[in-house]
Image (tube, rainbow, N blue to C red):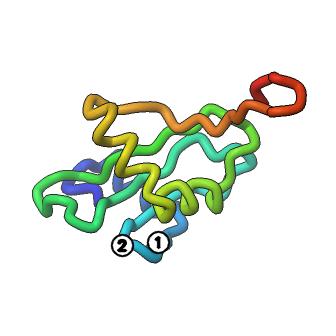
Amino acid sequence: MAKGDKKLSRWLNAATFAKSSNGYWLAWHNDDFLDKVAFLTPDHPDSEPCRWLESWDKDDTIQTAINYFESGEFESDEVEYPGGFVFNLQILNPETGEWE
């Protein structure tokens, strides 16, 4: 995942790893706040380091991230935003009309 990046290697040494049911490898730190998840796509080029999914919502969990990859939403977001995007799981409450 690090492809020679020493800073990334140190980060990965302290990470927890999992593989989603559809072939994504994920790595994260078990902190109080999940701010980023390193990942490899099922067809990730061997010559490239991992990519990052960043989250700015204090309520995001690793299970939320795994569900995001396994649901297929990641693939559609990647097509729509090829330059990258931020993982933010706020949803519109249909009763209040507020974003949560």
**Residue 82 spot, x, y in % from top left:** 26, 34
| Position of residue 98 in the picture relative to residue 34 (left or right) | right
| Position of residue 20 in the picture relative to residue 57 (left or right) | left
- Mark 2 to mark 1 CA distance (whole Å): 5 Å
Front residue of 94 and 77 = 94
Location of the C terminus by quadrant is top right
The residue to which callout 2 is attached is 23
> In the image, what residue type sits under mark 2?
Gly
Residue for point 28% across, 56% down: 2
Residue for point 53% across, 57% down: 28
The residue to which callout 1 is attached is 20
10 Å neighbourhood of mark 1: few (<14), some, or many (≥20)?
some
* Residue that protrudes farthest toward the right in the picture: 96
Under circle 1, the secondary element is: loop
Residue for point 46% across, 50% down: 73
Name the disc covering residue 72, or none.
Answer: none
Image quadrant of residue 72?
A: bottom left
